[in-house]
Amino acid sequence: MHLLFISSLLPDGQCATGFEIANQAIVDGLQAEGTRLTLAGFRRPGAARPDTAHIDLGELGIENAGASRVQKLRWLADAWRSGLPVSAAKLRVMDDATLRARLGEAGPIDAVVLSSVQMPIAFPFLGGLAPAILVAHNVEHLSARENAEHARHPLARLLYRREAGLLEREEARLCAQASVIHTLASDDARRLGLADDPRSIPLSLTVGHAGARGDDGRRDCDVAMIGTWSWAPNRAGIDWFAAEVAPLLPEDIRVHVAGRFDGAPPVAPANVAFLGRVPDAQAFVRSGRVVALATRGGTGVQLKTIETLEEGMPAVATPAALRGLGSVLPSNLRVAAEPAAFAAALVDLVRRERAGEPLRLDGGAFAERQRSELRRGLREGLSRLAAPAMEADHASRERRTARA
């Protein structure tokens, strides 16, 4: 089976965000199931090209972090003029005919994989190229609605509400059109109106790091946090941590926060250091005594949570950080929703780790379970996709036999 895998960004093996990690895991899983893949998408400026068959649509910077004020205003103007959500308007840098011609370079295909909704919203014809597998990384309209609730400026609230309305309509269209819909958290299927829909198949994800490195004893900080903080749901989490949790920590508890911000980091106590983007996310996570997973909203699955559990790291997490992971969780994980309980759990784990208690676990079993469930979900989706084609082929053979 030949699949055309379309994403806003080409998976290049150097994953910088949770979206890219998820894309790579799904690509690896589909290839492991024996499919032939052609990848299609834009490249982050300076990113390498994939080492598998691909259609490079050119370099395109789409992240808010690092974009100038002029660029952001241009995106808003393009979105308003086109009637598209901003996330889709950013991608509309060529016309339908040009994109259709480029995608034709893949040759005959059996199905198209639409990884997230932005590309098929920007180019609606994509869902009709072939039977479609839609990968809903998040419930985008609910995330936009949350962003509107958290926005401090009236104009920002207006823009996010506009995004939520457009995204809700487009997500409904894409779900109605798709032959298979994969969500990354089972609750997201219900939120998309797909409860009990046989086309809806949840996927587990794996980061793939488990067991890659042993504990080298390096401890650069007591509490490590990492994320794409330019994404509004993640920003809400770090703002909550800085304002409500960090002031409750003793001054000798050192917190390091890695990842890029869109604008300035939040105000935080002196024992909280913001490091920006780090060259090796895995090494950074392992350099802390404990990981803080302070998610406060959003949808989909939290890749930083999966990475933490695959690494076997002790951690404190909010309930939202654990969505989509089921009830079997490691013994070195604490769950806390309120600031005081979150801070107390961090202090307890840090003190115990400082005292030499071995709190790191082997995350291999968790990683293998995630990998197995990912393969099972993809296999089920491919089987469902293949069934109508097999039925049509059988009917065609019967008609030919009858005519003979």
Image: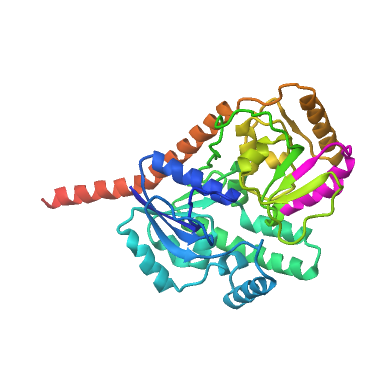
Question: In percent of the image, x 37 and y 58: which residue is there?
Answer: 130
Q: Position of residue 357 (x, y in %)?
A: 75, 21
Q: Position of residue 79 (x, y in %)?
A: 61, 73
| Residue 272 against residue 81 in the figure, above or below | above
| Residue 259 against residue 348 in the figure, above or below | below
Q: What secondary structure is the magenta-colored segment mainly?
A: helix
Confirm whether residue 198 shows in the render: no
Residue 303 left/right relative to 241: left
Q: Which residue extends farthest bottom? A: 81
Nearest the eye: 276 or 81: 276
Residue 10 left/right relative to 340: left
Confirm whether residue 257 shows in the render: yes
Instruction: Give yes or no for residue 304 being in the magenta stretch.
Output: no
Q: Position of residue 111 (x, y in %)?
A: 38, 53
Highlighted range, magenta: 235-256
Residue 326 left/right relative to 369: right
Question: In percent of the image, x 61 and y 44: which residue is there?
Answer: 280
